[in-house]
Image (cartoon, rainbow, N blue to C red):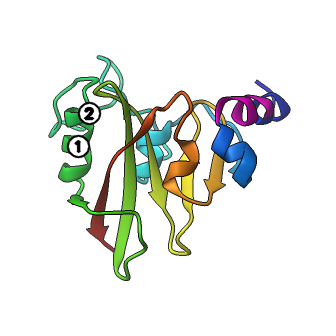
Amino acid sequence: MATSRWMTWLNVSFPNLRSEGFTVVDPPSDTYNCIAYAADDTSQWWAHISDIYWPPHATRSDRIASLLEVFAGLGYEQCDDSRIEDGYQKVALYETRGVWTHAAVQIPSGVWRSKMGEGPVIEHRNAESLAGGPYGGVHCFMRRPL
């Protein structure tokens, strides 16, 4: 899908992004997805489906509890909110009806980055910028020391 088609999809699918604005920071890629990106791995796709990489410390499942295991195994712990905290990196985990759908990572400036499926990496103002779209909403925030 061409970048302009991704832009159209993002603007149509995520009403908060459309109103708040966002920036494309990396072009579309089918090499890695949002989970891998939030885990700082741009070399492979991460998914609970067999024959696709999934960390061995986590249960292979589409349930949000499995995604919590993924990030806990990477040194993250649940935290109260998305506020920037010196010395920590945060991720936001998204779900719909108990099924994980997305992960976003906060960068040092306090804004968030998301790899949008096979599409681009975007920068958005806050984790809630993606709420109300196909990713559902934020289930929780997690943090780990830098």
Name the side, left or right, on which 137 lies relative to 29: left
**Dot 2 and dot 1 residues touching (CB under 8 Å):** yes
Q: Position of residue 47 (x, y in %)?
A: 36, 28
Q: Quadrant of residue 90?
A: bottom left
Residue on which the image places disc 2: 64
Report the residue at 56% width, 75% height from top: 109
Instruction: Please report the bounds of the magenta region as a residue range.
Output: 8-14
Report the residue at 28% width, 32% height from top: 54
Q: Main secondary structure of the magenta part?
A: helix
Quarter of the C terminus within the rendering: bottom left
- Measured along the vertical axis of the image, is residue 61 above or below residue 25? above
Q: Quadrant of residue 2?
A: top right
The answer for how far apart the CA atoms under marks 2 and 1 are is 6 Å
The answer to whether one can see residue 24 in this image is: no
Q: Amino acid at mark 1?
A: Leu
Q: Is residue 7 magenta?
A: no
Residue on which the image places disc 1: 68
Report the residue at 81% width, 27% height from top: 5
Report the residue at 66% width, 29% height from top: 13
The answer to whether one can see residue 118 in this image is: yes
- Measured along the vertical axis of the image, is residue 30 above or below residue 86? above
Name the side, left or right, on which 39 lies relative to 6: left
Nearer-the-camera pick, 91 or 82: 82
Q: Is residue 12 magenta?
A: yes
Question: Regarding mark 2 in the picture, which secondary structure is present there?
Answer: helix
Classify 10 Å Cα crowding around label 2: few (below 14), some (14-19), many (20 and above): many
Q: Position of residue 15 (x, y in %)?
A: 67, 38
Q: Amino acid at mark 2?
A: Ile
